[in-house]
Image (spheres, rainbow, N blue to C red):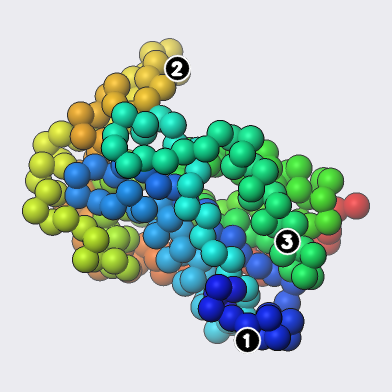
Amino acid sequence: MHLSESTWPEVRDVDTDLALVPVGSTEQHGPHAPLGTDMLTAEAAAVAGAEAYRDETGLDIPIAPTIPVGIAAEHRAFDGTLWVSPDTFRAYVRETVASLAHHGFDRVVIVNGHGGNTDALRELTGEISRYDDAYAVAFTWFEGVDSELPMGHGGARETAVLRHVRPGLVNEDEVEAANEGANEGWGEWVAGVNLAHDSAAFTDNGVVGDPSDGTAEQGERLVDDAAAALCELLGAVDARDRPE
């Protein structure tokens, strides 16, 4: 159940202490994919995971509105990219989780769609679980699936999911150009160190990988796999003893 589409009595009557918080980013994904890619894919994974858990347990899990802006200064060279500081991001997510815990939803899975958020979320969920009135973990959907499609950035994996969930937002006329201006990998690595702090240093158009490799059918499988992984995680979080 989406909190934004539910009434307060409906939320009051939910029989679970679990909740989902999708988080993404508003950042460039090349000339073919929307700035909201990470937000859209995170929400798709959260919804599919909640549906899978409902089918398995009969329980509706509240899904908070997707947090649309994350840690994305590395894409600032490309128009439209938005970002906040890590401190602001952590504070916003933490207080959102605290709001849920206030209403009894004190076991929270944050469903992430942006690689730039992962380190902050890993740190934050530890802080929440140690010191707040909640237990939280972070699930990054593209790390929770097993796929031969490379992740990249605006590459095959993300484009496949978009072609499945929001095909009208993929500019198919720009896919070839996206591939031509793409880099094969993320960053400029020497001795295990990435010398490039910003994506514009190694990709002309913001893309890493070949978006043409990701089909809608593959995107459907990715969402299904993410849903299965998230459903398993929700069961584990529900069964886990809260830390003292």
Q: Nearer the viewer, mark 3 or mark 1?
A: 3
**Residue at disc 1, secondary structure:** loop
Give residue 228's position: percent from left, percent from top: 50, 68
Residue in the foreground of this view, choosing between 95 and 132? 95
Residue 196 left/right relative to 18: left
- Marker disc for residue 99: 3
Q: Is residue 13 above or below residue 137?
A: below
Where, quadrant-wise, is the N terminus in this rendering?
Answer: bottom right
Q: Identify the residue position indicated by label 2 in the image.
A: 193
**Residue at (33% x, 20% y) in the render:** 188
Give residue 101's position: percent from left, percent from top: 77, 63
Q: Is residue 99 above or below residue 69?
A: below
Residue 215 left/right relative to 241: left
**Residue at disc 3, secondary structure:** helix
Spatial CA distance of label 2 from label 1 is: 47 Å
Near mark 3 (Cα within 10 A), the count class, few <14, some 14-19 or many ≥20, is few
- Between disc 2 and disc 1, whose residue precedes? 1
